[in-house]
Image (spheres, coloured by chain):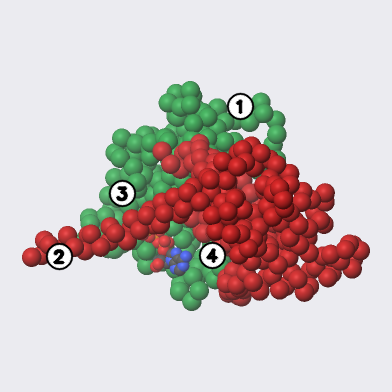
Chain colours: A green, B red
C-alpha cells in the first residue's frame, strides 16, 4: 500500500468484516481514503464493492439480518458508534446510485427535498442552494427553464446529473458513486466523468465502476477487490501499470471478471 | 391445419375477452329499457329531487331524493371509517410491521374480506344497533350510523389490500434516494412513498366506495329502512340498493313502481360510472404530473 503522509485521511476502514446473515461478504478490509481525491473500487461482480460502499453511509442499516465487525472512521469517528446520528451521517456522505433515481416530482422539488426534510423553510435560501448545486452539476443551462417539469421526463444522463446535483444540495463531504454510468450512453458518461473530476476539489469521492478506462480516467487511487478481500490498493497509475498482485494483473488484462 | 387450429384458439379467447363487454351492454340495455318508462309518468327532475317516496299510495309519489341521500350519507360515513383504518393497516403491514406481525395481520385482513356480507349484517343488528339504542336512548339502533359502521368495516379489507399493492409498486430506489439524502422513515413515507403510490391509493378508495354504495344485504338489515331524508345520522335511512331489494318482490311487473325501481338502479349505475370516470381522470392527471405516465 502507498503511504502518503501529506494527505488527509477522510474515511478509514479498520479491519471490516461484513455478513449478510451467515454469508461473509467482506473479509478484513483496511483502507485509507483521502480527502479531495477520487478513489475507485474495481473488481469482478459480487466481490463486495457495493457492500463496502453502502457501509460508508450506513445504507446497510436497511438490511435486516446483516452484521458488521471492525470500524469505519469518518474524520476519525467510528460511524457505527451508538451515538452517531445516521441522518446526520447521510447528510455528510451523499450517494449516487447505479440507476438514476429521481423522485416522481418536479426537478425543483427533487432538488429541494434534502433541505426541506432538514426543516429548512427559507424559500430564498433553498432557491439559492438549488440553483447553485444545479450549476455545480453542470445541469443548470439545460434545465433552467423547466424546473417545474417532472424529473422523470429528463434523459437518463440528465436524470443522473440531477441525482448528483440533488446530493450536492445538502453539502456532503463525501460522495459515493455506485456505477453511476452503468445505464448511460458514452456522451452522458463523459459528462459525468468530467463532473466527478470537477467535483473532487470540494468533495471526497469514492466510485465503484466496472469500466477500467473510467477508473483510469477519473481516479487518483484504485482499490481492487476480489471475493470480499481487498487485494491491492494504491495510486491508480501504479496499480494499472505495475500491479503487484497477479490477480490484479489478470483482472486488468481481462483474464477474468 | 396448424393455421386453422391457431385461428380457432384465437376466436375462443376473443370471445371470452368480449363476453364482459356483452354482459355490460346487456345490463345497460335492461336498465334503460325497464327504467326509462317511469319518466313518462314523472319528470326526471321530479323523480330525482322529489322528496317523497310513496310508490304504493294513491296517488303514488315517486321522489327518490331520500334514498339517494340515504346512500350518500351511509357511503360517506363508511368511508370515514374504511379509509383511515384500511390505509393505516396497509401502511403498517407493508411499511412497519415485522415479518412475524405481517404473517398474522395479512391473512386476518384477507379473512375479514372473505366474510359474506349477511354476516356483517348480523353483527350490526345484534351488537352495534342495541348498543347505540341503549347508549343514545334512541327509539331504534337500526339507523344510518349503524350502516356506516358495518359497511365501513366491510370496506376495510378492500381499501387495505389495494393500498398495499400500490405501496409495493413504489420502487425501492425512491426510498433509497430519500434515505441517502438524510430522510427518516416518516419523511420517506409521507413525502415520497405515499405520493408515488397516490394513484393506486385513490383506486383503493374508489373500490372501497363501490363496495359500499353497491352493498345491499347489510344495509337492508341495519339501516332501519325509512325512506325519509334523515335529520341526523342516527335516523333510519333507506339507501338505493335496499329500496330496490325490499320492494322488487311486491311491485307488479310492468307497473310504474316496477319501472321506478329499475330507474333507481339506472341512477345508481350512472352515479358509480361518473364517480369512476372522475376518479380515473384525476388519477391519470396526477400520474402525468409526476411523470409516471408519459
Ligand atoms: N442484500 C443482500 N443479501 C444477501 N446477500 C447479498 C446482499 N447484497 C449482496 N449480497 C451478496 O454479497 C456479495 C457482494 O455483493 P455486492 O453487491 O457488494 O457485489 P458487487 O461487487 O457490488 O457486485 P456488482 O459488480 O455485480 O455490483 C455477493 O455475493 C452478493 O450476492
Ligand atoms: Mg454492485
C-alpha span from label 4 to label 2: 52 Å
C-alpha span from label 1 to label 3: 35 Å
The percent position of residue A250, horizontal first and vertical second, equals 24, 60
Kindly state the secondary structure of the residue where label 1 is placed.
Answer: helix
Query: Quick check: A16 above or below A110?
Result: below
Number of other residues with Cα within 10 Å of mark 4, as a class: few under 14, some 14 to 19, many 20 or more: few
Residue for badge 3: A211
Please give the name of the residue rendered at 67% of the width and 66% of the height, measured from the top-left corner. B218
The percent position of residue A67, horizontal first and vertical second, equals 55, 70
Closest to the observer, B87 or A106: B87
Number of other residues with Cα within 10 Å of mark 1, as a class: few under 14, some 14 to 19, many 20 or more: few
Residue for badge 4: A63
Q: Disc 2 sits on a residue from what chain?
A: B
Residue for badge 1: A128
Residue for badge 2: B5
Query: Quick check: A196 above or below B190?
Result: above
Tell me the mark number nearer the camera, choosing from 2 and 1: 2
The percent position of residue B157, horizontal first and vertical second, equals 60, 64
C-alpha span from label 3 to label 4: 28 Å
C-alpha span from label 2 to label 3: 51 Å
Amino acid at each position: 500500500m502507498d503511504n502518503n503522509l501529506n494527505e488527509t485521511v477522510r474515511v478509514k476502514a479498520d479491519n471490516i468484516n461484513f455478513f449478510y446473515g451467515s454469508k461473509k461478504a467482506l473479509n478484513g478490509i483496511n483502507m485509507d481514503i483521502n480527502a479531495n481525491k477520487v478513489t475507485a473500487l474495481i473488481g469482478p461482480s459480487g466481490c463486495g464493492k457495493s457492500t463496502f460502499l453502502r457501509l460508508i453511509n450506513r445504507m446497510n442499516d436497511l438490511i435486516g439480518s446483516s452484521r458488521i465487525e471492525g470500524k469505519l472512521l469518518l474524520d476519525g469517528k467510528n460511524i457505527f458508534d451508538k451515538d452517531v446520528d445516521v441522518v446526520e451521517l447521510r447528510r455528510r456522505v451523499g450517494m449516487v446510485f447505479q440507476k438514476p433515481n429521481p423522485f416522481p416530482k418536479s426537478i425543483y422539488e427533487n432538488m429541494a427535498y434534502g433541505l426541506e426534510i432538514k426543516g429548512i423553510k427559507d424559500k430564498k435560501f433553498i432557491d439559492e442552494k438549488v440553483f447553485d448545486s444545479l450549476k455545480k452539476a453542470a445541469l443548470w443551462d439545460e434545465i433552467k427553464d423547466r424546473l417545474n417539469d417532472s424529473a422523470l421526463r429528463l434523459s437518463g444522463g440528465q436524470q443522473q446529473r440531477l441525482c448528483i446535483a440533488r446530493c450536492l444540495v445538502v453539502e456532503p463531504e463525501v460522495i459515493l458513486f455506485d456505477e453511476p454510468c452503468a445505464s448511460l450512453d458514452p456522451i452522458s458518461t463523459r459528462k459525468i466523468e468530467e463532473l466527478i473530476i470537477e467535483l473532487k476539489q470540494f468533495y471526497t469521492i469514492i466510485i465503484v465502476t466496472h469500466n477500467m478506462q473510467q477508473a483510469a480516467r477519473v481516479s487518483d487511487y484504485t482499490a481492487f477487490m476480489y471475493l470480499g478481500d481487498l487485494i491491492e490498493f494504491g495510486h491508480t497509475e501504479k496499480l494499472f501499470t505495475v500491479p503487484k498482485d497477479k490477480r490484479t494483473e489478470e483482472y486488468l488484462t481481462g483474464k477474468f471478471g | 391445419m396448424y393455421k386453422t387450429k391457431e385461428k380457432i384458439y384465437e376466436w375462443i379467447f376473443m370471445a371470452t375477452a368480449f363476453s364482459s363487454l356483452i354482459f355490460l351492454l346487456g345490463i345497460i340495455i335492461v336498465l334503460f329499457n325497464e327504467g326509462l318508462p317511469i319518466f313518462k309518468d314523472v319528470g326526471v327532475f321530479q323523480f330525482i329531487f322529489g322528496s317523497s317516496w310513496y310508490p304504493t299510495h294513491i296517488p303514488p309519489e315517486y321522489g327518490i331524493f331520500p334514498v339517494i341521500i340515504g346512500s350518500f350519507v351511509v357511503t360517506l360515513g363508511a368511508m370515514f371509517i374504511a379509509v383511515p383504518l384500511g390505509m393505516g393497516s396497509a401502511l403498517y403491514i407493508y411499511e412497519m410491521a415485522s415479518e412475524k406481525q405481517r404473517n398474522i395481520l395479512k391473512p386476518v385482513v384477507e379473512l375479514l374480506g372473505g366474510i359474506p356480507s349477511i354476516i356483517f349484517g348480523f353483527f350490526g343488528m345484534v351488537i352495534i344497533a342495541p348498543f347505540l339504542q341503549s347508549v343514545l336512548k334512541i327509539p331504534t339502533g337500526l339507523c344510518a350510523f349503524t350502516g356506516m359502521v358495518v359497511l365501513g368495516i366491510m370496506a376495510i379489507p378492500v381499501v387495505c389490500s389495494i393500498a398495499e399493492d400500490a405501496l409495493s409498486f413504489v420502487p425501492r430506489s425512491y426510498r433509497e434516494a430519500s434515505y441517502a439524502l438524510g430522510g427518516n422513515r416518516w419523511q420517506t413515507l409521507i413525502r415520497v412513498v405515499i405520493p408515488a403510490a397516490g394513484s393506486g391509493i385513490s383506486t383503493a378508495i374508489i373500490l372501497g366506495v363501490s363496495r359500499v354504495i353497491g352493498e345491499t344485504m347489510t344495509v337492508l338489515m341495519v339501516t332501519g329502512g325509512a325512506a325519509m331524508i334523515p335529520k341526523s345520522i342516527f335516523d333510519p335511512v333507506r339507501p338505493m340498493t335496499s329500496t330496490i331489494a325490499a320492494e322488487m318482490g311486491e311491485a307488479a311487473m310492468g307497473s310504474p313502481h316496477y319501472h321506478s325501481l329499475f330507474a333507481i338502479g339506472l341512477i345508481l349505475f350512472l352515479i358509480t360510472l361518473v364517480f369512476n370516470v372522475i376518479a380515473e381522470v384525476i388519477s391519470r392527471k396526477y400520474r402525468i404530473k409526476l411523470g409516471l405516465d408519459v
